[in-house]
Image (tube, grey):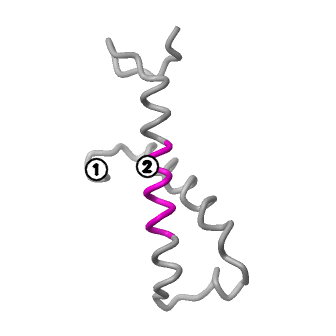
Amino acid sequence: MVNGMDEGRKRVLGIMASILVSRHLKTTEDLHDSRPNPRTESLVASAVQWAERILRRIDGTFANSTDDKRLPRG
């Protein structure tokens, strides 16, 4: 799904995922560790999935079916 996504949506997805992950990183070592860590990798993957789910929910609530603009349904 990410391949067909525009750059703006990817940025929003990244910001949302970062916020979700940051809640679970306890120490500065977690934040600055450059080695792959299974726990951190799992947290990031889960956060991206949740961010995608949130964006789909927003799209379902605010997308106008006649043209793909994001407008509140009335």
Name the residue: 59% across, 66% down: 21
- Say which label, 2 or 1, has the lower sequence index: 1
Is residue 50 highlighted in magenta? yes
Seen as rendered, the residue at the extreme top is 74
Relative vertical location of residue 50 with respect to residue 70 in this rendering, above or below = below
Q: Are marks 2 and 1 in contact (CB under 8 Å)?
A: yes
Coordinates of residue 26 in the picture (x, y in percent)? 72, 79
The reply to whether the magenta stretch includes residue 9 is no
Residue 32 falls in which quadrant of the image? bottom right
What are the residue bounds of the magenta stretch?
44-54
- Residue 5 relative to residue 35: left or right: left
Residue at point 44%, 46% (across, down): 53
Rendered location of residue 61, percent (x, y)? 48, 25
- Residue carrying label 2: 52
CA neighbours of label 2 inside 10 A, class few (<14), some (14 to 19), many (20+): many
Q: Main secondary structure of the magenta part?
A: helix
Could you say whether the residue bearing mark 1 is in a helix, strand or loop? loop
What amino acid type should be assigned to the residue bearing mark 1?
Met
Q: How much space separates mark 2 and mark 1, taking CA atoms?
A: 10 Å
Between 72 and 14, the one lying in front of the other is: 72
Looking at the picture, which amino acid does disc 2 mark? Glu
The residue that appears at 64% across and 84% down in the rendered structure is 30
Q: Considering the numbered disc 2 on the image, is that residue within a helix, a strand or a loop?
A: helix
Residue 63 rendering spot, x and y as whole percentages = 42, 22
Q: Which mark is residue 1?
A: 1
Q: How many labels does the image show?
A: 2
Residue at x 58%, y 62% (from the top left corner): 18
**Mark 1 Cα-neighbour bin, 10 Å: few <14, some 14–19, many ≥20:** few
